[in-house]
Amino acid sequence: MTRKQPRRSNRKSKASVKGRRRKLKWLLLLLVAVCLLSLLVVDLLVRVKFEGKKWSLPSQVFARPLELYPGLPLQAEELDSELQGLGYQIVQRVTGPGQVMKNRGRYHIYSRGFRFWDGLEPAREFEVRLAADRVNQLRWLGDESVDSALLVRLEPQKIGGIYPAQKEDRLLVRLQDIPPALGEALIAVEDRNFTDHHGISLLGILRASWVNLRAGGVVQGGSTLTQQLVKNFYLNQDRSFVRKGLEVVMSLLLELHYSKAEILETYINEVYLGQSGSHAIHGFAQASQHYFHKPLGELSQTQLALLVAVVKGASYYNPWRHPERALERRNLVLQIMAREGLVDAQQLQVAMVQPLDVVASGRRPSQQYPAFMQLVKRQLQRDYQDQDLRSEGLLIFTSFSPFVQQRAEQALSSRLQALEAQRQLSPGKLQGAALLMSVGNAEVLALVGGRRAKFAGFNRALDMRRPVGSLIKPAVYLTALQQPSDYDLASRISDGPVTVSGPDGSLWRPRNFSRQSHGQVPLVDALAHSYNQATARLGMQLGLSRVKSTLVALGVGAPVPEVPAMLLGSVNLSPLEVATMYHTLAAEGVYSPPQAVRSVLTADHRPLQRYPLRVEQRVDAKSVYLLNYALQMTMHQGTGRSAYRQLPDSLAVAGKTGTTNGQRDSWFAGFSRDHLGVVWLGYDNNDKTPLTGSTGALSVWSEIMTSLSTRGLAADLPRGVGLHWVDMATGLASGENCRGAQQLPFIEAARQASAGQERAPCQWRQNPLEFWWQKLRP
Amino acid sequence: MRLSGWYQLCGCLMLLSLAACSRQQIVSPERIVEPRRVVIPASPPDSPSLKASVSSLLGRIEASYSRGQWPLAIAEAERGLRMARRKPELYLWLARSHWRLGHVEEARHFTQLGLRYTEVDSAVERRLQGLLTELGNSQGHR
């Protein structure tokens, strides 16, 4: 028994060892299997992400391209601003795209070329001559074989983006499109052995470990470019052993599956290079626009060196916040480039003393125009899903004019400050909004949503609805003028006190702003001087529903209460709605819906959608001509006349002031041949202001219009309209040489129907012989 | 001869008396306060160079239309309207292109708008009138 026991226990222990070994073997096998499986999973992850859609690309939003042609009204200032916005380099000799040479009104420009919805606009070399605020001459230089059309489009400025949820801003670039010096410098600085290693560099890791050990902390990374890509593209910024292990494995797998060129291209598009507000700047192409406002291909060696310098730490080497650090690092990069033979000693000497040359920090485009971007998004959201706008890299072309926007922002901000100072108001409280449209197509050129235009807050130009006061009056007079057998501009209406009783027995007694009545007045004067009593009387004669129909025809989509007070503007509209209404007047009765987006292209420049011009004749052109004549009189002798303190007398414009009860809102809407502008001033809390439409909004509008290249209203009479002399005191027909006579437009058919009407007795202004003689003289 | 001399003398005397009357009216103080007569300035016409640019663009539009690239013709005509909004030929090409694309209502609107800017009895007026008649007879797509 006693001898048998050890044998048994021996056997037992042997069996248990065997069992343990077997278990261990299984465990090892299991471990290997798990490892292999994990490796397969990791491999799959690496390949799926690398070969699939790598990034969510933001949509890029562009301004309108500046079209140049002989005869275009254009100030030198506007062309300068456009070229500066596009990052054109001013040079002594033009050698390539993106350059301009200026010499006393002559611009020698080499455009960059761009693919638009309707095709490629090639890079072109041409000369523009400006004279008297116009393009006087446009001449091709260089290649003579180009299309001879005297029309050239500059590439459009990027004005913003619609970003993915992770707020990454990125412009993709292919490896063959990057300057060779960039790739070489990047490899020289970040990973000298990039072309030789298989994803990791043991030597690099050992060197970094030694440096870190001596420093007592992590001061140097031994990562290759591949590892950096893996860290940024697949992993996070954690510093753990597991993450580091995964990084090594993934780097090896990446190198196993893909070429060095593919890895480098992905790195160049992935690397984090800065921050623009809440948006992260990724990739060298976007960084080039961010720091220099130029495409990569136009960067100098020193600028390329700065981009490579920033790779090490975009925040630490931020050239705006820490210019000394950035300069030191850039110069180190330049020295490494010299060591590797990428620049020679002489180039190095010149480059080392160059400034950083980054654009002014306030000129970074992605955060410039939040109010207009809201309008763009609203228009696009009708046709596109939010996810597509944020991830598909769409190219969105708009009607936005950066120059007009700048002018509108400046005018609003400076006039608000001046008004507060003049009227001793609490500074910074008075608010405003402005909107500029192109006449004829209702394209929105500029939009200012508040006095802090760069702040993406409440957009007053789109979302604020306030009573419009006298801005509504043109609709009342247009309703009358559409009945030419009953009304013309000389028709007389009483401006005496008026009382209207409501259905509930309440009485409405509107008063003139001056608290005075003016007796019988012609319609043209009643509108030009904005008489409330005459307008209320006329509106009641016409009928509220007819006036409302005119408002709807003009494009007012907001609810209009059918109450007498609506005749004097108790209708709440936004500046955009007011602009839509006045655009129908400016376009001679043709309604067009307001537009901000012209076309959309896919990320690879394939046409996706175009928003064509839509027109609809809503109101008779002849009646609108008569009304616009009265609105021109408003500007010359009525409530808008102060505009001509700033505008040249020769510029024919039409417009209307608007002031609401208690002077809570100061409005002005007016137009020239090319531009329509609407301005609102007031307090957000609806407090009273000391401003009328004339003393407030009109001053902003005039300042904007003065700064634009715009043409006066066309004087051509539409068919069926003729000019006749009228005695303004009686409304009877008169003559040119008669006292108190004014020439007014009339609808001929109605005028002829009342032919043989009584003529006013004429008191000559001038000796008739002298008058006839002067008329006969050439 | 003598008779005609008398007529001439009488005529001169009458004119002189008229002139004297009017002078008296001008110096009357209550009439000096007449309000300023408003003359709305006539805007200058488009420059010849602008017309040349638009003509050159019209050539392109016609070529696009002839190739059957109607959306392109529309886009180019809209570019033209930004340069010269009152050029009736641009409306003609817009209307024709929209019609080709089956947008009859748009075609009609552009035709009517173009007619507004034509000169009486001009070639473009006749073409627009013809198109309007065809559109009236149209059943929709073409």
Image (cartoon, rainbow, N blue to C red):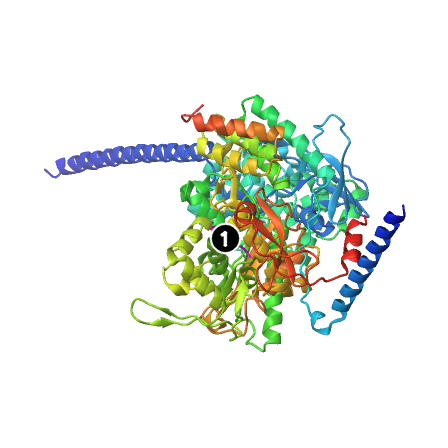
The picture places residue A28, in percent across and down from the top left corner, at 32, 34
Task: Name the chain letter of the residue that bears numbered label 1.
Answer: A
Question: As drawn, which residue projects farthest toward the front?
Answer: B3
State the residue in front, A199 or A84.
A84
Q: Who's the residue at 70% across and 70% down the image?
A: B31
The picture places residue A712, in percent across and down from the top left corner, at 66, 51
State the residue in front, A738 or B49.
A738
Question: As drawn, which residue projects farthest toward the right?
Answer: B2
- Per the image, the residue denoted by label 1 is A481
Q: Is residue A272 left or right of residue A10?
A: right
Residue A342 seen in the current view: no
Please provide the residue range marked out in magenta.
A482-489
State the residue in front, A707 or A184.
A707
Amino acid on which disc 1 is placed: Leu
Vertical order, A243 against A414 (above or below): above
* Quarter occupied by residue A296: top right
